[in-house]
Image: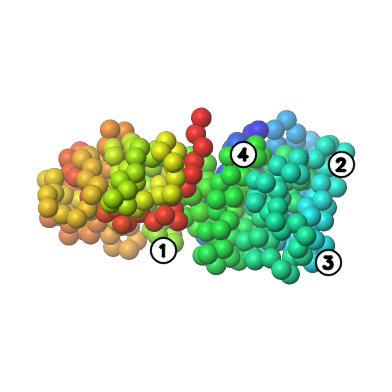
Amino acid sequence: MSIEISLRHHIGTFDLAADFVSGAGITALFGRSGSGKTTLVNLMAGLMRANSGRIKIGPRVLFDSEAGIDLPAHQRRIGYVFQEARLFPHLTVKQNLLYGAWFAKLRGSANFDHVVSMLGIGALLTRRPLNLSGGEKQRVAIGRALLSNPDILLMDEPLASLDDDRKGEILPYLERLRDDAAVPIIYVTHAVSEIARLATSVVLLADGKSIASGAAADILGRLDLLPFTAQDESGAGSLIDATIARHEVEDQLSVLVSPLGELRIPALAAPIGMALRIQIKARDVMLSLSRPTDISALNIVPCRIVALRDDDGGMVNVELDHDGGHFLARVTPKSVRHLELHPGKEVYAVIKSVAFDRRHVGAWART
């Protein structure tokens, strides 16, 4: 189902101008705080009315200022998951879920048992929200939204209120939701790590404007967008599709087949043949003019420099290509001068196995 957005809105001194088209999977609305992400999803949901523009979800036009169309929120068939779960405290988990299904009674609800199984909340049905962890509450909130049988899910930073352990608990369920629910998702975040793990595509917002949109790997890998995308503690990085080729049990390693060749990473508890997406942080990639020997790093990738770009931190981001597989390295200006790095130069990229963070390795269903 396609999502077509073209909106203009003015609030005080803030102007929003958003234009993008997206489809299945998770579309991340990404940008710094104050860039307009929450305002945009509230306009889509009908919680606010845009000054002008158009919202189309599949064949249905929800808002068109020129045609005089403005469906109220309850007719837009949109499920909304907020930063806080906002469950009814006096109802059990099952009753909260059935409240979502009640809104879908005229259209036919999604299958209750399937949603409960997909989100792993079967054992929680008799509990009340007070007795749930933060991650459990969010899974129930997602289930309630799904059971309203929406055409699209809006998720406004659903992990923002969770600590790292609770985020790790819920991320696999969000992956399953992306791959199995067949409902397109608009996912608000300012965390690169969540995009690396979840996003199919990205819409980049800055100062109220949508400045770029496209596949997640393409957006995060563009040198010209790094001032906007390399904004958290992880810095610039690359997203690489891979498949588990084998496990080297004795060495506690998993070997992946990827566009960069074979990569060895810390052992994953996942079956051979499983499709993954991994994040390689630019700061974890070293460059050498010759193939290194007698070093501890296990991943050495011959490649060619495509482009170089200075960043705001006084470093240089280097775009690299290996047989069509693009990724980034981050080095000092001194290294650029010493190695005489320039576009077209052949180098070797060195990536330590221990640099791969299991939290940023995500299951990825590919057809």
The x and y percentages for residue 96 are 79, 56
User: In which quadrant is the N terminus drawn?
Assistant: top right
Residue at the extreme right: 106
Q: Are marks 3 and 1 in contact (CB under 8 Å)?
A: no
Dot 2 corresponds to which residue? 105
Q: As shown in the figure, which amino acid type bears the numbered disc 2?
A: Lys
Q: Nearer the viewer, mark 1 or mark 4?
A: 4
Dot 3 corresponds to which residue? 90
The x and y percentages for residue 21 are 59, 37
Task: State left or right for residue 71 relative to residue 291.
Answer: right
Neighbours of disc 3 within 10 Å: few (<14), some (14-19), many (20+)? few
Q: As shown in the figure, which amino acid type bears the numbered disc 4?
A: Asp
The x and y percentages for residue 30 are 53, 52
Q: CA distance from mark 2 to mark 3?
A: 23 Å
Q: CA distance from mark 3 to mark 1?
A: 40 Å
Q: Residue at x 23, y 42 (%)?
A: 301
Q: As shown in the figure, which amino acid type bears the numbered disc 1?
A: Glu
Q: Which mark is residue 233?
A: 1
Q: CA distance from mark 2 to mark 4?
A: 22 Å
Q: CA distance from mark 2 to mark 1?
A: 45 Å
Dot 4 corresponds to which residue? 180
Of callouts 4 and 3, the N-terminal one: 3
Q: Which mark is residue 64?
A: none
Callout 4: SS? helix
Callout 2: SS? loop
Of callouts 1 and 4, the N-terminal one: 4
Of callouts 3 and 1, the N-terminal one: 3
Q: Nearer the viewer, mark 3 or mark 1?
A: 3
